[in-house]
Image (cartoon, helix red, strand yellow):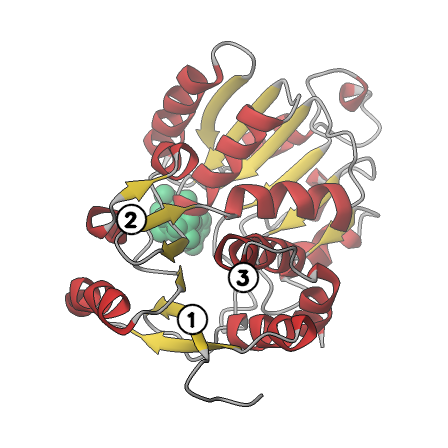
Amino acid sequence: MKIDGNTTIVGVIGYPIAHSLSPRMHNAAIQALGINWCYLPFQVAPENLEKAIEGMQGLGIRGLNVTVPHKQAVMRFLDWVSPEASAIGAVNTILNEGERLSGYNTDVEGILAALRFGADLENLPEKVVVVGAGGAARGIVYALTTVTDVRHITILNRTIPKAERLAAEMEKMAKEKTEIEGKGLDGETVRDELGEAGSGVCETTQGAGLVINATPVGMYPKVDCSPIEDPSVFHPRLVLYDTIYSPEETKLMRLARSQGVKSFNGLDMLAYQGARSLEIWTGTKAPVEVMREAVMS
Ligand code: ATR
């Protein structure tokens, strides 16, 4: 990579940022495109967020990815926020066009492409269980309700009122197309919602076909934790999508695989959301295969 007076800068802001895979992924894509760009990590403490966004305009940084803990807070410093990002309440991509800063949320396309192409789920099942009711879960439930034909979503969360609130809010947005319920993450509820192996429950709309972990439980360094601990709740017709990508096989994935459940990690979602961000900044198609390889190597 040759940096000179014409190099366009893009990057990512977060706190902490040292372990981000985004610089490796985006710089591989930039190299493949043969453009004079460079993607940098910026560690930005919460109290410096406003200054960082002003700096983006002052320095002419073309685009930024936004990660934890700034995805919500950054919205008030932008001139325009996409309908998707404002419905989810989080921005993960900023485009700087000089006079105007625009906010997008490419996690929506990231999860949908990861399910479609990464997990090979061209047709999503009628019922999906989402574990977690935080920011990541919000984006996923929004994506499932607005873009897909999923008919029933159950949000399972340790704190039940949060699951119920998210379900009610998203159901309003789904305009009766999707039924969304919020429940607890206790063993019995998980078993009921997933449908038991051999019970025949999963043959009906009561049994889930897909379970998505949208909590950080099991993420490095706490790799011995799992949001679902009892492997007997899994039946082999389920597919598991874990949004965690470090470690590449989480304890949850290990438990599910022990029961014959096809399981995928969050690397595809990372690559597809990154590809969409790069497309917003460059206006050209991103080399998503290069990006996938970069995060998987
Ligand atoms: P994110 O934006 O990454 O989704 P978040 O908004 O802090 O992060 O949400 C974290 C989610 O993980 C929440 O659903 C949280 O459950 P609570 O609402 O009960 O806090 C869930 N979570 C975090 N730690 C957990 C744990 N040890 N067991 C179960 N769920 C956990």
Query: What residue is pinned by disc 3?
Result: 218
Q: CA distance from mark 3 to mark 2?
A: 24 Å
Contact check, label 2 and label 1, Cβ < 8 Å: no
Q: CA distance from mark 1 to mark 3?
A: 27 Å
Residue 149 spot, x, y in % from top left: 66, 21
Amino acid beneath label 3: Gly
Above-or-below relation of 206 to 165: above
Eye-nearest disc, 3 or 2: 2
Contact check, label 1 and label 3, Cβ < 8 Å: no
Task: Tell me the residue at 69%/35% (across/down).
Answer: 210
Mark 3 or mark 2, earlier in chain: 2
Q: Is mark 3 within 8 Å of ligand 1?
A: no
Q: Secondary structure at mark 3?
A: loop
Eye-nearest disc, 2 or 1: 1
Query: What residue is pinned by disc 1?
Result: 11
Mark 1 or mark 3, earlier in chain: 1
Task: Tell me the residue at 29%/41% (across/down).
Answer: 80
Q: CA distance from mark 2 to mark 1?
A: 18 Å
Q: 296 or 280: nearer the eye?
A: 280
Task: Tell me the residue at 71%/27% (across/down).
Answer: 195
Q: Secondary structure at mark 2?
A: loop
Q: Looking at this view, name the residue that lies furthest to the top.
A: 176
Residue 20 spot, x, y in % from top left: 48, 73
Q: 128 or 25: nearer the eye?
A: 25
In the image, which disc is placed on residue 135? Answer: none
Q: Is mark 2 within 8 Å of ligand 1?
A: no
Amino acid beneath label 2: Gln
Residue 44 spot, x, y in % from top left: 27, 72
Query: What residue is pinned by disc 2?
Result: 72
Amino acid beneath label 1: Gly
